[in-house]
Image (spheres, grey):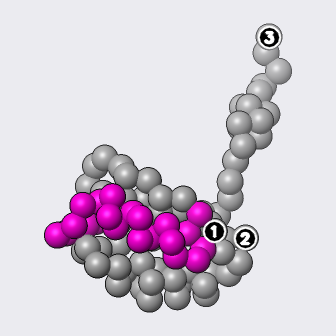
Amino acid sequence: MVTAFVQIKTAGRKPSAVAQQVISIDGVAEVYSISGDWDVLAVLRLATYEQIAEVVPEKIAVVPGVASTTTILAFRAYTAGELAAAFDIGLS
């Protein structure tokens, strides 16, 4: 399973309208409205990088109101337990 985060800048439409369309795209697991330079963050979970390479330009980027996107690929996910173990040096 490949995870990618797609930052979306909107223009001409409310971010909520764009988010509602993006969440209906196959492979999009979650969509958030966010603060900062970008308006919407989509979390993609697909089987291959090739599928992400198709979904972003062919499905997300063409949604009305999407002005631009930036895609961030995740290499590994860390859970809270894994992080605690990684930083545990045995001190009480």
Q: Residue at x 55, y 69 (%)?
A: 28
Res 52 → quadrant: bottom right
The residue to which callout 2 is attached is 1
Question: Would residue 10 be counted in the magenta stretch?
Answer: yes
Left or right of 42 in this view: 16: left
Nearer the observer, disc 3 or disc 2?
A: 2
Circle 1 residue:
45
Q: Is residue 69 visible?
A: yes
- Disc 2, disc 1: CB below 8 Å? yes
Quadrant in which residue 62 is drawn? bottom left
Q: What residue is rendered at 45% in x and 84% in y?
A: 59
Task: Report whether 48 appears left or right of 53.
Answer: right
What amino acid does circle 1 point to? Arg
List the single residue furthest toward the right.
90
Taking the spot 42% from the left edge, 78% from the top edge, the residue there is 60
Evaluate whether residue 72 shows in this view: no
Q: Quadrant of the N terminus?
A: bottom right
The part of the chain drawn in magenta is 5-29
At numbered mark 3, what does the secondary structure look like: helix, strand or loop? Answer: loop
Q: Is residue 31 above or below residue 85?
A: below
From the image, state whether disc 1 or disc 3 is nearer to you: 1
Badge number at residue 92: 3
Q: Is residue 66 above or below residue 54?
A: above
Residue 42 covered by magenta stretch: no
CA gap between label 3 and label 2 equals 37 Å
Q: Quadrant of residue 47?
A: bottom right
- 3 or 2: tag closer to the N-terminus: 2
Viewer-closest of 19 and 6: 19
61 w.r.t. 4: above or below: below
* Crowd band around label 3 with a 10 angstrom C-alpha radius: few (<14), some (14–19), many (20+): few
Given the image, on which type of amino acid does mark 2 rest? Met
